Amino acid sequence: MAKRKKSEELQDSGFGCAWPGCDAPGNFRAPRSRQNLHDYQWLCEGHIREFNKNWNYFEGMSQEEIYAFQKEATLGHRPTWRGDRLGADAQHKLEEAFVRMFSDGQARDHVASAKPISAKSKDALAMLDLAHPSDKPAIKAQYRELVKKYHPDVNTGNQRAEDTFKRITAAYHYLMAHYVE
Ligand SMILES: [Zn+2]
């Protein structure tokens, strides 16, 4: 039996890309979820590539979870914890996926510095209102608290909150990759 294609190109679907925040023409057809391969969304060339790259990861994910993934990917592959909308399991899966993406990319380019910590780690801790020595569970807990406060979803149109959110997220990822307890 022939293997089902993950996505399919159409010359001109007339649809826009369904990826959140993207307004390119969506001429590539992709299933909305792995559970229902006949229910399509339309994506642009860049996003169909992104979609296909994550195809294995989408296994077992619902349409809502995939959409949440796409939305977060738009924000720069950063995790957010939407306890109110996604179950803990979905959150966990999202989190893991982002950790994977990070460890495939820039995170691996740097070797974690030994104690004492670098100025950059210190700054990142300060960004999260923490001080050395700390540990990853504490950093994670603190980040979750700050996310609740600064997430763009609860600060619609507030540019300052959005900037803070980006900075704490960057600080958090930096520490997860580099902080040596
Ligand atoms: Zn797109």
Image: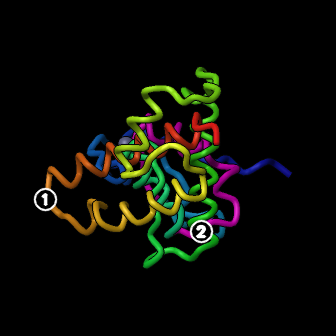
Quadrant of image for the C terminus: top right
The amino acid sitting under disc 2 is: Ala
Ligand 1: which quarter?
Answer: top left
Residue wearing tag 1: 157
The amino acid sitting under disc 1 is: Gly
Which dot marks residue 38?
Answer: none
Q: Which image quadrant is residue 88 in?
A: bottom right
Classify 45 as above or below 75.
above
Q: Nearer the viewer, residue 46 or 75?
A: 75
The residue shown at (52%, 40%) is 175
Q: Which image quadrant is residue 107 in?
A: top right
The residue shown at (53%, 66%) is 65
Which span of residues is magenta-colored?
41-63
Q: How is the image coloured?
A: rainbow
- Coordinates of residue 23 in the picture (x, y in percent): 26, 45
Q: CA distance from mark 2 to mark 1?
A: 27 Å
Classify 37 as above or below 175.
below
Which dot marks residue 90?
Answer: 2
The residue shown at (70%, 59%) is 59
